[in-house]
Amino acid sequence: MSQSPLALVTGGAVRVGRGIVLALIESGYRVWVHCHHSQAEAKALATEHPDGIAGVCSADLLDANARARLASVIGPRLDLLVNNAASFERGAFVDRSDDDLRRVLELNLVAPLSLVRSCLPALRNAPAASVVNIVDLGARNPWAGLLDHSISKSALETATAGLAAELAPLRVNAVAPGTVAWPADGRAPEGSEARARLLARIPRGQIGSPEDVAQAVCFLARASHVSGHTLVVDGGSTAALGGAHA
């Protein structure tokens, strides 16, 4: 009887991370779910899917020692590492500090690279293993008020390509979602001009969903000759940017 492939998804208890975990379970993976503040949600997910969840690991990814402990928990083999956990800190450039930038870079860039390094022995014990980093459109078109975030995701996308070359035959790819959920702070309520403007920039006329991102992750996990690429999941928004200047 073949052994189920194992995955580790950081930030896997809520939102996009939860969608990725559920899609991987549906695809036959057993999944280690990392969480930090969402421990209750992670435990509930494990209770709902006892056969699909390999375990729940709580760790502050800003802490190098906690990252090392996380990598040690998963065991000697890992088929898929999904670096999903990230911050999304807003603020005008002039109002933020060097410490703010360092904190964002530590979580969004240093932590994923640290986990790849720490998990490398386990990944190399799985012949078809791969890494999928979650970036976003801010990596290519920096967002006003989110410069620290955009810088960190741009660097992670660059690192994805570099790691694909340096760590081969291990495959390393990224997924760059567009809008896959409405802002939780109410900045674009239903029927508002803000929501209409956002939808007007998406050729398909609708936002995506966590499930759309999860489908892209599952594709990259099984695409055996795809490495060093970023799969954009944005309903055509990036493609439309060119037409806007025609």
Image (cartoon, helix red, strand yellow):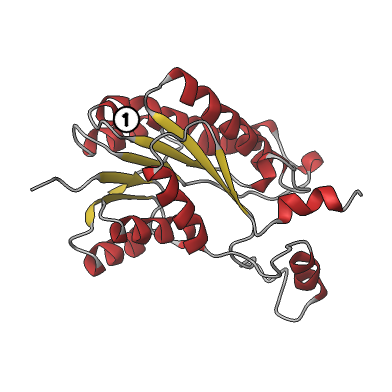
Q: Which residue is mark 1?
A: 119
Residue 11 in view of the camera:
no
Q: Residue at x 19, y 32 (%)?
A: 76
Q: Residue at x 73, y 48 (%)?
A: 91
Q: How many marks?
A: 1
Dot 1 amino acid type: Cys
> Residue 115, image x and y in percent?
39, 32
> Residue 19, image x and y in percent?
42, 61
Q: Residue at x 75, y 47 (%)?
A: 143
In the image, residue 116 sits, relative to residue 211, either above or below, namely above
> Residue 61, image x and y in percent?
42, 39
The residue nearer to you, when weighing 22 against 73, is: 22
The residue nearer to you, when weighing 142 against 185, is: 142
Query: Furthest residue to the right?
Result: 246
Query: Furthest residue to the top?
Result: 166
Residue 92 in view of the camera:
yes
| Image quadrant where residue 153 sits | top right
In the image, residue 156 sits, relative to residue 146, either above or below, namely above
| Image quadrant where residue 66 sits | top left
Q: Is residue 123 left or right of residue 176?
A: left
The residue nearer to you, when weighing 165 against 198, is: 165
